[in-house]
């Protein structure tokens, strides 16, 4: 039985990955910060066979303890402060957690497992996955973006992700660790946080349809993204750590859609015209916008044998249906509209 340790277990990717690995017969541990984490019960309800261990990316000693306790074959570093808009308000915090947190995890892996080679084989048995982001491309230098496209980050979050990406490469080349990064383009699901535009839209659509909200206020409707289903993308993460040698991979659908398209399709799912309910507000515009992100996932398609199974339309429908069901349950149980 193989063992995996997942940081960022309380996020959408962490829960989907835990479910996937448990189905593969893994012994799975999830790193959680603080015993009173408000998402602890939610995570345990999704993956009850997973064991949670305490640790913090800012506390390297706790990471070393977690690795010594779990003895993982695979470490998936998904933890980050991933809400881009917040990164301008708390730039230093995002830099420390999303950037230096990767260094702390890598150093813990090196400390516990060692480095170098013995008899032609890596002496460190642990394999490390870093969750890189398409936001690193920022003001894109070419379309679509591949593993060789230069980075031009446009937010403190993206800058921190670039650091995490390059320090992973550095530890791979300096210490011969099995360490790789997945440059994942936007991936969504019903488990996405409400602060993200896709879930903000699907949640508002359900509330507007059921008469519990009057309008949806958004920022840049013309921003275009390569959106896929998170449940597909965690399969790619797992596949990356099953290869003979560590490499970095771009993961995406190869399709691009605007925020306006997402809103139009979401409202159409419940028989409404999006233009009757959506307005824009400059408050929701980024200080430095990323206009278009589009993946070239050829390497992941060919070397990993990975392809997405959920289309853009299916993703939008899935999220709206989930939020409709959740909002109807809130009505049934008497939860006020403003809560």
Image: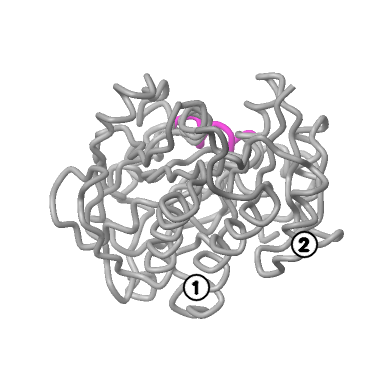
> Which quadrant would residue 59 be assigned to in this image?
bottom right
Residue 95, numbered label: 1
Q: Position of residue 243 (x, y in %)?
A: 45, 27
Q: Position of residue 94 (x, y in %)?
A: 52, 71
Decide if residue 13 is on the left or right side of residue 332.
Answer: left
Of the image marks 2 and 1, the number of the one nearer the N terminus: 2
Seen at 44% across and 56% down, the residue is 174
Is 107 a magenta residue? no
Q: Nearer the viewer, residue 15 or 101?
A: 101
Q: Position of residue 249 (x, y in %)?
A: 35, 38
- View extreme (left): residue: 142
Decide if residue 274 is on the left or right side of residue 196.
Answer: left
Image: 68 above or below 17: below
For mark 1, give the secondary structure. helix
Seen at 44% across and 60% down, the residue is 167
Q: Nearer the viewer, mark 2 or mark 1?
A: 2
Q: Nearer the viewer, residue 181 or 186?
A: 181
> Which quadrant would residue 57 be assigned to in this image?
bottom right
Decide if residue 161 is on the left or right side of residue 264.
Answer: right
Q: Which residue in the protein does label 2 denote?
A: 62
Neighbours of disc 1 within 10 Å: few (<14), some (14-19), many (20+): many
Q: Main secondary structure of the magenta part?
A: helix
- View extreme (front): residue: 119
């Amino acid at each position: 039985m193989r063992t995996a340790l997942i940081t960022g277990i309380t996020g959408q990717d962490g829960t989907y990955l835990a479910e996937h690995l448990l189905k593969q017969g893994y012994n799975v541990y999830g790193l959680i910060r603080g015993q009173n984490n408000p998402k602890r019960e939610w995570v345990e309800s999704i993956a009850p066979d997973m064991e949670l261990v305490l640790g913090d990316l800012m506390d390297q000693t706790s990471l070393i303890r977690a690795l010594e306790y779990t003895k993982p074959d695979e470490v998936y570093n998904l933890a980050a402060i991933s809400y881009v808009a917040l990164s301008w308000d708390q730039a230093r915090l995002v830099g420390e957690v999303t950037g230096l947190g990767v260094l702390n995890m890598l150093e813990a892996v090196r400390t516990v497992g060692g480095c170098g080679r013995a008899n032609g084989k890596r002496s460190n048995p642990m394999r490390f996955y870093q969750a890189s982001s398409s936001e690193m491309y920022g003001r894109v230098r070419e379309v679509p973006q591949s593993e060789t496209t230069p980075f031009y980050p446009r937010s403190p979050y993206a800058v921190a992700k670039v650091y995490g990406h390059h320090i992973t490469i550095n530890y791979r080349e300096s210490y011969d660790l099995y360490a790789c990064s997945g440059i994942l383009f936007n991936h969504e699901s019903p488990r996405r946080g409400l602060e993200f535009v896709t879930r903000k839209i699907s949640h508002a659509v359900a509330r507007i349809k059921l008469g519990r909200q009057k309008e949806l206020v958004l920022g840049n409707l013309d921003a275009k993204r390569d959106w896929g289903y998170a449940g597909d993308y965690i399969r790619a993460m797992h596949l990356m750590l099953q290869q003979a040698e560590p490499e970095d991979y771009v993961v995406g659908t190869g399709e691009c859609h605007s925020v306006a398209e997402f809103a139009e399709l979401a409202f159409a799912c419940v028989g409404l015209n999006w233009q009757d309910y959506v307005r824009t507000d400059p408050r929701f515009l980024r200080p430095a916008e990323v206009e278009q992100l589009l993946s070239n996932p050829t390497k992941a398609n060919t070397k990993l044998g990975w392809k997405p199974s959920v289309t853009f339309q299916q993703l939008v429908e899935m999220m709206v249906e989930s939020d409709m069901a959740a909002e109807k349950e809130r009505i049934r149980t008497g939860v006020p509209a403003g809560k």
